[in-house]
Amino acid sequence: MLPVVLGLAPALLERGRSIEQFDFEEAQLRPLTMPLAFEQIGDPGTGSDFPRFGGMSLTEENPHSGRFAFRFDLKGRSMAARTLPGTLPIQPLVDHRISVQVRTSSLERAGVRLVAWLVDVAGSELETTRSVSRVLSDSGDDDDQWHTLSVTVPGVDQAAAELVIELQLVQPDLQSDVDTGRPLTRPSIEDISGVAVFDDVTVEQWPRLYLADASRIGLHAQRSPVLHLRIDDPAHGDAHWHLNVMDSTGQVVHEQSGDVPAHGLDETLTLPLTKRDWYTVQTTITEQNRVLLEDELAFALLNDLDRHRPEPRICLDLTGSESNHGQAELAIDLLGHLGPGEAIVPMWHADVPFRTSWPDTMKHVDELKRLDIQPTLALNWIPPDQRSKGPFDPRDAARFLATHPDTLDETVQAALIAWGDTASHWRIGRIEDNANDLASAEAALLGRLDGFVIDLAINTADSEVLREQDAVTPREQMRTTAISLVTDWCDGTDTILIAAPWRPGTRGMEPTATYPILQTMIDALSGRSTIARLPAGPELEARLLEGTDRDSIVIAWRTEQISFEDSGSLLRLPLDAARIECRDALGNSVTPRPRQNDVAIPIGDLPVIIRNFDASLMRLPTRCAIEPGRLEASMQVHDHELAIENTLPGSMQGQLIVKAPEGVTIRPSVIGLDLPPGGTLRMPIEIVVTTPLAGRPLEVNLEARLDSGRRVPMNTWLDVSLPDLEIQWTRRDEPDSDDLLIDLEIRNFRNASRRLKATLGHHELEMLRPATLRVEADGTMTQTFRIPAGCRTLAGESISLMLEDPESRCRLRDMLDIPGISQTVQVETP
């Protein structure tokens, strides 16, 4: 019978995409208990996975379509029905999609799934073709509702002759496809009753989508990215393909589309992209408003692909799941373009035994050494061939080694044979491992290496890894990573550990959103260990970085998160706009804005790197400050000191002009300069507060007017505040109300309570008595002010917010802007 049915396969293929549907309507022709194309499988014995408990029947109760559906009545254990031999002949090397409509009721633990595979002419299952759907159980309100389950069976074997479909109702012990290799130590709890109903089992010939990056690792520089798109569709239907390219902000920057020809599609696509960024490509195949297939890949467009000098303070961790054994060679290639000085390489892998992975591990470590990258050999996965000694968490190598230290013998011996006395850097475990297990594992490794290697270093995981966070946008991830990296670099001297910024793709490896950021920032930081803070202003930070054999740079960034569309803040520096080069952390140009004696550089959502300037001139603002840098907002005379150091190669002779901001007077305002190179001037000054100041940093502008005719503008900032208080005014919206709500939050850092006065002011408001507030010692309090209908009556206006400390005679005055009301005007047209 089977050869006869197989002879019908070409005719079936001519029917289009759908080659078979089981709707169970054969029961209309004559009474049937079971569908003609299915049989219940399993053995009567209780030791079988499907012991033929429960019943199967055709039912007229609430079918998905037509009159009949296929019902399973559970009576303990699991149930399955399979297509009869010869039912579904297919053409080899063609993918097939099987879908089924399912509803369930009264199931708590058991669930329904769809399984399908290919067999040869002898009926033997072909390896790698078995496909299993998700498990569908009751889900509360969805009980007894119809749902779709589907699987795609890959046509990867020329010997395929027939498709087999199995409808399963499985208990918890069969719901996992992972074989732990260990017998169950206790029985699982099962459902003893429940119902599953199947209908409209559809078999379709499915297209095959191949989307690949020509670079294999998703890195492109100096030229347009090239992709390969291939679509095979045996159904010869009316399929359509569409490709979208999106940048890191999610904006579509390029798209292409077309019909899928009858003979398929095989094209090389050159993407007209020039902006340095991280991109995602989404390709979709649709037919009659139905999505058939989707695929996605990511790539980075970089400034260059030169291998950067290794930086000893940067270490890449390659032990995560993104650097599995099968992709390790591509991971090393991606690593080389980042320029770390150290890489943590797994000696043991979670997916293959040590003897299988060792030849490739040895080759990859040799490649790291060739690139002058120090390899650290990691033991933090338990190889699958060792797990029978457990049970152990596959990631808990520390506990495994503490219990079975002799397992190290083969690994250590292999490392010593391969690298001799240079096999000296090792790492054990994870940061969350038990301290005693880590100590025992470290002692076991030390005993096998001591005396055989030079500069032995065995580390345990004791620091956090800079890694990408879930649930944030790619652009937010870029910003967070860039700022974390530069602040870690500037604020410490320890090694910075970074998780591998790539992931396995459908066709090789691909970079994650942080890869281009890390490439630019590591290159900028590498070799520049002399760091000075530049005065930058509110919401900005800037650092001058210098190195012995590298040019000086400035890195500036926003301290508060902003959107990509935000125009950003302006960093003013005493530089020549025509000479300097400014690029963001992706490598894209940033246009500086020239001013009379300095330049304003816009700082957006990503840090900006500034090059090509006179380093001695840029050091000058880092050596100019008013001390102390905090100004109490009391209307009186405050004693401070102005300090300036000459960082120029020649003498500074002339005058320093101090320009006082509004609300204060600075005496003296003109200071004579006569400083040799490296000389320092410290001048007592008086700052007189003449009006209440705003509770934000106060900019003081200075200008060195030298006898040579050169003018050097500088600035410094004073933090204005009430003594030992932290103050925050916030406007708060209330749903369905146009009342204006303003919250005042005060934190008192003294060990004594404070009494303050708060006042709101506006010319449309009747002046109210100041509110007297009491803030407890080391305490926090919040006061809410409500202005009825204020959002409407004060729209587009500003409100004065005054806070006074009678004890210190300090006053802070801020302004709160009230948004205007948007108006829509209707225009009648003839």
Image (cartoon, helix red, strand yellow):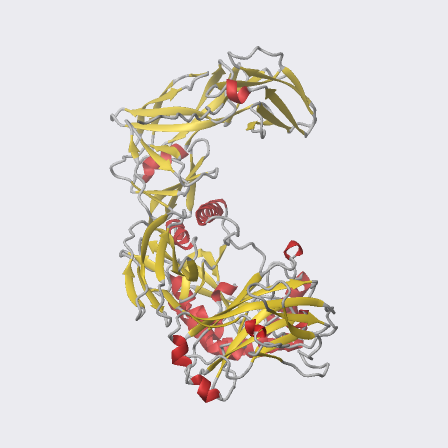
Kindly tell me whether residue 504 is visible in this rendering.
Answer: yes
Residue 441: % across, % down: 63, 68
Pick whichever, 576 or 695, lies toward us: 695
The residue at 36%/54% (across/down) is 244
Rendering quarter of residue 506: bottom left
Residue at far front of view? 29
Q: In this view, does 323 lie above or below 828?
A: below
Q: How many labels does the image show?
A: 0
Residue 257: % across, % down: 32, 57
Q: Is residue 72 left or right of residue 629?
A: right
Q: Is residue 571 above or below residue 672?
A: below
Pick whichever, 530 or 820, lies toward us: 820
Pick whichever, 475 or 660, lies toward us: 475
Residue 435: % across, % down: 66, 61
Q: Is residue 85 left or right of residue 298?
A: right
Q: In this view, does 691 lie above or below 698?
A: above
Quadrant for the C terminus in the image: top left
Kindly tell me whether residue 414 is visible in this rendering.
Answer: no
